[in-house]
Image (spheres, coloured by chain):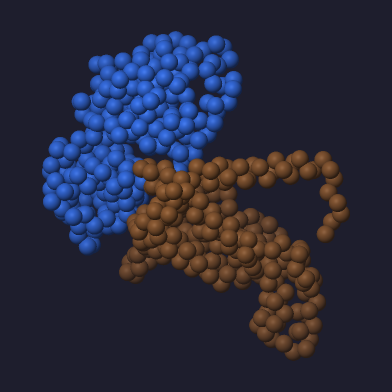
């Protein structure tokens, strides 16, 4: 979606402005965390935990698609930490990494439908039905690649009406009623989004790993590893679990 | 033509040009010329370009067909409400792309104000090329309406009045007097509408979806390609800019530069 990307652009521009870059007016330090969009809620909680434990440090979160974040980091954006929704994007920024990447969470796929499941959909093969308008992620983005893997594992040929750019776009199309069903990460299939989850057989076989690493190019390279530690800690684990993420 | 420009405006004009030209030049500089022919001839690229040109042409046609009457109506309408109505019609120009898409969804989506009734009648716009055309028409219409209205507003209407006294019907007067006189403005409106339709992105993505050959226009293909191959995204972006610049350069002339009977500004 272009809203997060616009936000990202503005945030990056602000970060690049001299004066707002490394310290705020009262001498506070700033820790900049680039994290995949699916981590928005979890990292919001961890941000508060971190700031409570590190007085004087202001954590700034930049969320977006992992590949978009990776591209900005490669263009010189000052990230102290990068948490990616897949290993390919962590690999893309390997020249900027300060500590070796560690997988801190996993995600699997599920199906979402209109609340009440009026069409009685039960599995991926229903998505090939002619009377079902389904949306999936495009094969070029991580959730779409995982969807293709799952479909071929089960032996189903999907016939989507649209291949979206991000998992949040898929949720949006189903929640708005434009589409009857979609395939998303379990962490996105929240009832609060106005969708109902239909667990998929075989979904546990296709696991997306989320790696995290401290980055060298930020303004507080000394603080990065401590945030990574928090994410990997028991506290971090508990927050991730509550949001539906699996253990590495 | 006005007189000679004050000297101090020169540097400002150059900065203005740089603000616009620099990012485009920087994009062209990123282009990998050796890979460009291969990147631009993939089935995905050709499909997206074809769809973009076809939908932009259709929505420009719709803008001309509907925007000209609306511009005419606005120009001749005498009401205190006119500024408010005009401002409302310009809203697509300022709406953030995603909001434009949501607005279309609320109107024409499967559960939308009008969309639900259409759905009951067996007409579904969801995920169709028609939805793309609708999104582009929505964002491009203001250019056509504005061009028509301002050109008409600048005309005194003497010729039309004369045609009327000579017994010409309103329709005949429109085709034989008004439209020829408005030609430069109509061309301006058409070109701007086409360029805007060609670049439409957010409303299409939110409202129409993204499916190769059906709804994935060139801007959507660029956005997706960027995920995996930045070079391909740059090549497609340069192609899009080249098409738009060519169309504008060929068709657009400043209104005042044409010999007209007062149809200009």
Taking the spot 39% from the left edge, 63% from the top edge, the residue there is B129
- The hue used for chain A is blue
Taking the spot 42% from the left edge, 49% from the top edge, the residue there is B35
Q: Is residue B66 left or right of residue B182?
A: left
Task: Report the front residue among B73 and B60.
Answer: B60
Q: Give the vertical position of A106 relative to A171 (above or below).
A: above
Taking the spot 58% from the left edge, 26% from the top edge, the residue there is A17
Q: Give the vertical position of A234 relative to B257 (above or below).
A: above
Q: Give the vertical position of A66 relative to B190 (above or below).
A: above
> x, y percentage for residue A10?
53, 34
> x, y percentage for residue B189?
63, 64
Task: Report the front residue among B97 and A100.
Answer: A100
Q: Is residue B109 visible?
A: no
Q: Is residue B80 left or right of residue A130?
A: right
Q: Is residue B265 visible?
A: yes
- The hue used for chain B is brown
> x, y percentage for residue B237?
48, 50
Q: Give the vertical position of A86 relative to B237 (above or below).
A: above
Q: Residue furthest bottom?
A: B167
Task: Report the front residue among A115 and B197.
Answer: B197
Taking the spot 61% from the left edge, 56% from the top edge, the residue there is B90
Quadrant containing the N terminus of chain B is bottom right
Q: Quadrant of residue A63?
A: top left
Quadrant containing the C terminus of chain B is bottom right
């Amino acid at each position: 979606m272009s809203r997060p990307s616009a936000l990202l652009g503005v945030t990056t521009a602000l970060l690049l402005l001299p004066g707002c870059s490394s310290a705020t007016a009262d001498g506070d330090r700033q820790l900049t965390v680039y994290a995949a969009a699916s981590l928005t809620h979890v990292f919001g909680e961890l941000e508060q935990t971190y700031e409570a434990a590190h007085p004087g440090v202001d954590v700034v979160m930049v969320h977006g698609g992992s590949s978009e974040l990776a591209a900005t980091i490669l263009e010189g954006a000052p990230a102290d930490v990068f948490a990616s929704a897949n290993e390919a994007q962590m690999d893309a920024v390997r020249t900027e990494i300060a500590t070796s990447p560690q997988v801190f969470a996993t995600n699997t796929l599920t199906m979402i439908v209109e609340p009440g499941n009026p069409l009685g959909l039960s599995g991926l093969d229903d998505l090939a039905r002619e009377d079902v308008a389904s949306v999936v992620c495009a094969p070029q983005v991580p959730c779409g690649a995982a969807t293709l893997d799952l479909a071929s594992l089960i032996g189903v040929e999907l016939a989507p009406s649209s291949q979206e750019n991000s998992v949040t776009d898929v949720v949006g199309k189903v929640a708005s009623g434009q589409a009857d069903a979609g395939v998303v990460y379990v962490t996105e299939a929240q009832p609060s989004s106005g969708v109902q989850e239909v667990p998929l057989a075989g979904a546990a076989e296709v696991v997306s790993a989320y790696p995290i690493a401290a980055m060298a190019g930020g303004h507080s390279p000394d603080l990065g590893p401590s945030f990574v530690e928090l994410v990997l800690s028991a506290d971090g684990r508990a927050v991730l679990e509550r949001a539906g993420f699996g253990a590495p | 033509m006005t007189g000679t420009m004050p000297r101090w405006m020169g540097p400002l004009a150059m900065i203005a040009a740089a603000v616009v030209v620099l990012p485009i030049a920087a994009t062209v500089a990123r282009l990998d010329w050796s890979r460009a022919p291969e990147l631009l001839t993939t089935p995905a690229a050709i499909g997206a370009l074809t769809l973009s040109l076809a939908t932009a042409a259709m929505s420009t046609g719709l803008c001309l067909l509907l925007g000209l009457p609306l511009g005419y109506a606005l120009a001749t309408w005498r009401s205190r409400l006119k500024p408010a109505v005009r401002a409302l019609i310009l809203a697509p120009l300022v709406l953030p792309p995603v909001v434009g898409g949501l607005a279309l969804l609320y109107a024409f989506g499967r559960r939308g104000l009008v969309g639900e009734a259409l759905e009951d009648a067996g007409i579904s716009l969801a995920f169709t090329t028609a939805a793309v055309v609708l999104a582009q028409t929505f964002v491009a219409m203001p250019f056509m309406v504005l061009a028509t209205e301002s050109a008409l507003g600048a005309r005194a209407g003497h010729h039309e009045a004369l045609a009327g006294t000579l017994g010409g019907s309103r329709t005949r007067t429109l085709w034989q007097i008004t439209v020829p006189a408005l030609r430069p403005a109509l061309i301006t409106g058409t070109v701007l509408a086409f360029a805007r339709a060609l670049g439409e992105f957010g409303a299409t993505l939110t409202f129409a979806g993204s499916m190769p050959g059906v709804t994935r226009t060139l801007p959507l293909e660029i956005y997706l390609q960027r995920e995996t191959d930045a070079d391909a995204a740059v090549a497609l972006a340069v192609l899009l800019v080249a098409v738009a610049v060519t169309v504008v350069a060929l068709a657009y002339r400043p209104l005042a530069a044409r010999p007209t009977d007062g149809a200009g500004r």
